Image (cartoon, rainbow, N blue to C red):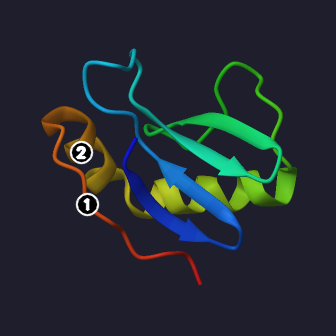
């Protein structure tokens, strides 16, 4: 599972292509929390529990890098993205 970015104690990862399911999403991991976030709009999938302030940061990250994340999902070519400041 490639690490895409790290910021404010949050790690953004994307599982390897072929091991994941639709719709396109990333996983955010922080302390005892882990949740999938849709690439299309940054919302939490499956009513997963994630601290609200941290979920808002992940949502901003996904919105900022949506095109890059979609490309990674489609191609399976992963790269690091700059963290939120």
Residue plotted at (77% across, 23% down): 47
Of callouts 1 and 2, which one flags the residue occurring earlier in the amino acid sequence? 2
Residue plotted at (28% across, 42% down): 70
Secondary structure beneath disc 1?
A: loop
Number of marks present in the image shown: 2
Residue nearest the observer in this picture, 80 or 37: 80
The Cα–Cα distance between marks 1 and 2, rounded to whole angstroms, is 8 Å
Pointer 2 residue: 72
Q: Is residue 65 above or below residue 28?
A: below
Q: Residue furthest top?
A: 21
Q: Is residue 63 above or below residue 8?
A: above
Residue nearest the observer in this picture, 84 or 76: 76
Q: Residue 62 location, x and y as percent? A: 49, 53
Asked if labels 2 and 1 touch by Cβ distance under 8 angstroms, the answer is yes
Q: Residue 61 location, x and y as percent? A: 52, 62
Q: Residue 56 location, x and y as percent? A: 72, 57
Left or right of 22, for residue 67: left
- Local crowd at mark 2 within 10 Å, few (<14), some, or many (≥20)? some
Disc number for residue 79: 1
Locate the C terminus and report the quarter of the image it occupies. bottom right
Q: Nearer the viewer, mark 1 or mark 2?
A: 1
Secondary structure beneath disc 2?
A: helix
Residue plotted at (24% across, 51% down): 78
Left or right of 82, for residue 80: left
Locate the N terminus and report the quarter of the image it occupies. top left
């Amino acid at each position: 599972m490639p690490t895409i970015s790290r910021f404010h104690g949050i790690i953004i990862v994307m599982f390897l292509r072929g091991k994941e399911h639709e719709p396109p999403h990333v996983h955010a991991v922080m302390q005892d929390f882990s949740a999938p976030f849709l690439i299309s709009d940054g919302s939490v999938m499956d009513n997963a529990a994630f601290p609200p302030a941290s979920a808002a940061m992940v949502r901003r990250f996904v919105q900022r890098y949506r095109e890059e994340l979609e490309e990674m999902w489609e191609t399976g070519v992963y790269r690091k993205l700059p963290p939120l400041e």
